[in-house]
């Protein structure tokens, strides 16, 4: 999608909220596709929107979950997509670092919120990319996502907080985990060492369990 088309969609969604849902849906579908295929463009648009007076109005209509924090990691804003993504309403003054309920690595290990990519971006004051995590909702369902935590600075260069966008990669991650489980099982079958076989089998079980959880959305 060309940049000028992207800007037109964002302007129309943000500045004419009374439009019919039948009119709005194609715009949101275009943005959802853009978020999946070119997330950095959506992030750039979010950064531009935050610099304007109607930034939150525009971000509220985006299909990609986006939220901001202050310089201490306290959540200060989230768009409507965050609620559906996290399965909960974030709490101002309580939530810090992330809007999700529980976090896990792709191998199923718990991740403390203070160790999540957003926390790293805030502490190091630099964007964090290429991370993948799994969010668990209060109802027990899980979603794999790629975060785009990015620090924010004012016009004087002072650090003011951060913005994060969460892109759902559950389908791709479930497939990758299933493939990894198959590789582990093939290696286990080829091993003569019982301990190594048990370790690989346990790893395969974990990969398969996580892939199955992602398929329950």
Image: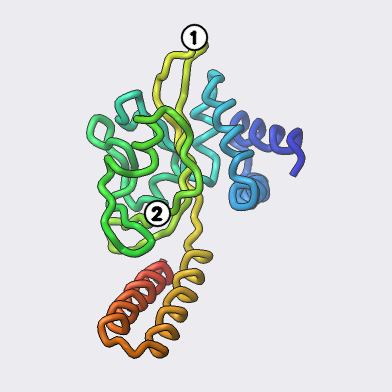
Q: How many marks?
A: 2
Between 43 and 116, the one nearer to me in the picture: 116
Q: How was the colour assigned to the protein in this rendering?
A: rainbow
Kind of element beneath mark 1: loop
In which quadrant of the rendered view does residue 120 lie? Answer: top left
Q: Which residue is mark 1?
A: 156
- Residue 133: mark in rendering: 2
Up/down of 77 relative to 63, above or below: above
Answer left or right for 93 relative to 179: left
Q: Quadrant of the N terminus?
A: top right
Kind of element beneath mark 2: strand
> Gap between marks 1 and 2, in whole Å?
33 Å
Give the farthest residue toward the top. 156
- Residue 94: mark in rendering: none
Up/down of 35 relative to 183, above or below: above
Q: Quadrant of the C terminus?
A: bottom left
Bin the neighbour count of mark 2 within 10 Å (Cα to Cα): few under 14, some 14-19, many 20 and up: many
Image position, residue 41 (x, y; %): 63, 39
Image position, residue 193 (x, y; %): 30, 86
Between 44 and 117, the one nearer to me in the picture: 117
Residue depicted at 34% across the width and 44% down the height: 116
């Amino acid at each position: 999608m060309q940049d000028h088309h992207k800007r037109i969609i964002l302007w129309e969604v943000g500045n004419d909220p009374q439009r019919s849902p039948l009119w709005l849906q194609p715009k949101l579908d275009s943005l959802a596709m853009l978020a999946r295929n070119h997330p950095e463009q959506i992030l750039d648009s979010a950064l531009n929107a935050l610099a304007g007076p109607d930034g939150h109005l525009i971000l509220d209509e985006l299909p990609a979950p986006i939220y901001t924090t202050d310089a201490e990691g306290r959540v200060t804003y989230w768009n409507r997509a965050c609620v559906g993504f996290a399965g909960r309403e974030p709490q101002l003054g309580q939530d810090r670092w992330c809007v999700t309920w529980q976090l896990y690595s792709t191998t199923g290990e718990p991740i403390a919120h203070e160790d999540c990519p957003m926390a790293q971006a805030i502490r190091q004051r630099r964007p964090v990319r290429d991370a993948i995590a799994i969010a668990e909702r209060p109802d027990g369902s899980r979603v794999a996502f790629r975060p785009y935590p990015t620090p924010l600075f004012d016009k004087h260069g002072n650090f003011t907080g951060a913005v994060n966008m969460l892109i759902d990669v559950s389908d791709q991650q479930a497939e990758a985990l299933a493939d990894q489980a198959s590789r582990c099982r093939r290696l286990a079958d080829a091993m003569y060492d019982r301990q190594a076989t048990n370790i690989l089998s346990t790893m395969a079980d974990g990969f398969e369990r996580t892939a199955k959880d992602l398929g329950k959305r």
